[in-house]
Amino acid sequence: MKLSILDRSRTRAGVPDAAALTGTIDRAVHAEQLGFHRFWVAEHHGVPGIASGSPPVLLAAIGARTDRIRLGSGGVMLPNHQPIVVAEQFLMLEALYPRRIDLGVGRSLGFTRPVRDALRRDRTAPDTFADDLDELRRYLEGAAPVTARPRVEAAPPMFVLATRRGLDFAARAGLPVVVGGPILGSTAGRIPELDRYRDEFVPSPGNRKPYVVISLEVMIADSTDAARDLLLSEAWALASSSRTGEFPALEPVSVLRDRPWTQRMREQIDASIESSIHGTADEVRERLDSLFARTGADELLASTSTFDREALFNADRSLSLLYRE
């Protein structure tokens, strides 16, 4: 089973945003040392809790510090960019770090209306994702009327960050998918959306068969309670964002425990933590085995965040050992 990491460059209360970026680079170096397959970064705009707004720039910095691990975007939000610009950025990365670059693309718009306005995005605008995806692919493969440069020996592979509708796009385009969130928890048995993706998959150059990456938080600690505590900072931030409309920086668990908790926040936090896979190494291995069997997934992309960086690195180390022969 391939194991990979998605790091969103989470900021921490009282610490400059730059520390989130250098922390991401350090984590990528650590992930390579541990033998992870990929290390991906994210695109968010105007979000206090996330310092990464430009995946290509951050990936260039990570590439300079690593040698082997695959690097990619989880993802570039295609509605925010012209396809030729995305192609040029990732072709440049591929030229600098050959056969190590992935291009994950998504459909999400800005988190708030001011951000969408700043990105010149309108929720009522036509959905051009399928056409943009096809145009981007043609630029990458050198098949468009305009040649995107630099030219490279092999175009970086594309992945679709897929919601239910995104799975249909990916199947028709013959592209691998990254799925997470509600889809993974929608049923106790096989997941119909993933089965439909596989049934309707149209083989394409470089992708002769469907490929599924599942993405969720995975936290390993010495006990279930300790793992749950480590997830509290992220769960609190998510619950807070639903109330304030602003996704905040991570805070220490000790600070959060002294805060007043409404019943609604407690329910949201509990639900967020339960949607993750957490516990001791043995507990996590058992739950992952079950999830892999249920989804038929080819790869795990762990999107774990916590305030305590040392604990995060320890969790990465424990995860890297789960499927090692």
Image (tube, rainbow, N blue to C red):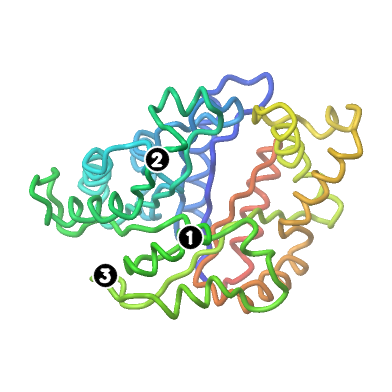
Q: Residues within 10 Å of mark 1 (few under 14, many from 20)?
A: few
Instruction: Tell me the amino acid under the disc marked 2.
Output: Ile
Q: In this view, does 131 lie to the left or right of 42?
A: left
Instruction: Please tell me whether mark 2 or mark 3 is closer to you in this view.
Output: 3
How many numbered marks appear?
A: 3
Q: Position of residue 95 (x, y in %)?
A: 20, 47
For numbered disc 2, what is the local secondary structure? helix
Please, is residue 142 above or below residue 294 in the view? above
Is the C terminus in the top left, top right, bottom left or bottom right quadrant? bottom right
| Viewer-side residue, 13 vs 265 | 265
Per the image, label 1 sits on a secondary structure element best described as helix
The amino acid marked with disc number 3 is Gly
Of labels 1 and 3, earlier in sequence is: 1
- Residue 218's tag is none
Callout 2 environment at 10 Å: few (<14), some (14 to 19), or many (20+)? many
Query: Which label is found at residue 165?
Result: 1
Q: Nearer the viewer, residue 112 or 97?
A: 112
Q: Read off the residue under disc 2.
A: 62
Whole-Å distance between the Cαs marked 2 and 3?
A: 26 Å
Q: Look at the numbered disc 3 and give the secondary structure of its residue.
A: loop
Mark 1 or 3, closer to the camera: 1
Q: Which amino acid lies under the numbered mark 1 shown in the image of this protein? A: Arg
The residue at which mark 3 appears reads as 206
| Residues at circles 2 and 3 in contact by the CB criterion of under 8 Å | no
